[in-house]
Image (cartoon, rainbow, N blue to C red):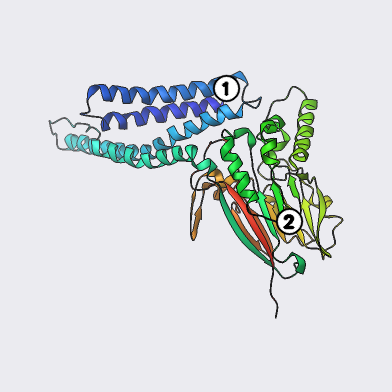
Amino acid sequence: MRFIIVIIIWLLIDFYCFNAFKTALQNTQNYSKVITLTLYWVVDLFLISSILYLNFSGKLENGGVKSFSLLFGLTVVSLSPKLIITPFLLIEDIVRIFIYSFQKITSILYLNQMEPTFIGRRKIVSQISIGLAAIPFLGLIYGIVRGKYDYRVHKVDVFFDDLPLEFDGFKITQLSDIHSGSFDNKEAVEKGVKLANDQNSDLIVFTGDLVNNKAEEMDEWIPTFSKLKAPFGQYSILGNHDYGDYVKWDSEEEKKNNLKRLKEVHKEIGFNLLLNTTVKVKKGNSSIALIGVENWGMRGFHQYGDLDKAISSIDQSEFKILLSHDPSHWEQKTLKHEKHVHLTLAGHTHGMQFGIEIPGFKWSPVKYIYKQWAGAYKKNGKYLYINRGFGFIGYPGRVGILPEVTVLTLKRTKTS
């Protein structure tokens, strides 16, 4: 029922914004006007019918995400400009109604025989609204064509008083949210993997969501991601999408086998999968504890992670790095834990794949959902870093918040 309501709202917005295009195309050659207005409806009716087909055919429930992702992306491209046009039309309509009402009341009060007229839309208003709407329209198209594979390296230094001296300068490359089921350009993905390797980090970690839904999505990408290598190894955890919770399975056994296969894929890539457990990364006579928990999230996400279990064998004095997919785990569990976790690495938010990042300013709509959503945070002497994601899901693109390869350098605070 909700799905149908969304479609109805979509059509209402379409009908409303159609008036702006008709007004803006006044005095335009007839054939150009007809072609433009016909395309307006053909595109949206195609999108609506395709999404309805995928939904009611059950293909969405069975993991048909790639086709839906493209349709969803085109829907975002189509609807976003109309959401900008709509307020202009509403304001104009309010003014038109006010003028008409004022004329009507005046004619009644003063017995004016002149009948009030409902003024038409002004062409300039429609043209301005369409011109402004073209900015996100073009940006979203660019995000699909180029932005989704425009990998960026984010380098961050994190300082600790109690970092083992031998780990001073130790580099960690973090990847997150690969979402292999969404990829459609092997050459671009391989460039991203090469960029990660080119950082020459000591350790590579992956913080969850290897696939969208099914382990088989990784089959063609195993050779690509198995190229990831680091001297101290590659470690990984699971994200919310890795458990197959968003797919309709024929049986519970089939779902379990999918997760079992995905764990095998981690091994085939060369990832050491941490499932509520800890490993010691040793360098010389020192070591750091690398903790990996299963997904733990808020707002309806499953809470498979068990930090108590994962951290039980570690002494309070040991230096600890936690891999936890969902950043909400940091404030809800990690910060409150009796054992001091120095650094938590997370992903999950993707920065909503849309926003603004310029020196000194960072914004995305996801900030209204997640208090911590991208980059570095510090509280009570504990650090959190949230990777913006290597891949994409839903909208098949990125605008402003670009795919990320993180390089964190551990540094020991100099003491006098």
Residue depicted at x 80% and y 45%: 275
| Tag 2 and tag 1, C-beta contact below 8 Å | no
Residue 119 lies in what quarter of the image? top left
Of the pair 277 and 129, the residue shown nearer to us: 277
Q: Earlier in the sequence, mark 2 or mark 1?
A: 1
86 w.r.t. 359: above or below: above
326 w.r.t. 408: above or below: above
**2 vs 1, front mark:** 1
Secondary structure of the residue carrying numbered label 2: helix
Residue extending furthest toward the right = 313
Residue 403 percent location from the top left of the image:
56, 46
Q: Is residue 331 visible?
A: no
Residue beneath disc 2 = 334
337 vs 12, left or right, is: right
119 w.r.t. 270: above or below: above
Amino acid type, callout 2 = Thr
Q: Is residue 73 visible?
A: yes
199 w.r.t. 96: above or below: below
174 vs 292, left or right, is: left
Of the pair 80 and 90, the residue shown nearer to us: 80
Residue 107 lies in what quarter of the image? top left
Residue depicted at x 76% and y 29%: 255
Residue 388 percent location from the top left of the image:
59, 48
Question: For mark 2, does the 10 Å Cα neighbourhood hold few (<14), some (14 to 19), or many (20 or more) residues?
Answer: many
Residue beneath disc 1 = 54
Residue depicted at x 68% and y 55%: 201
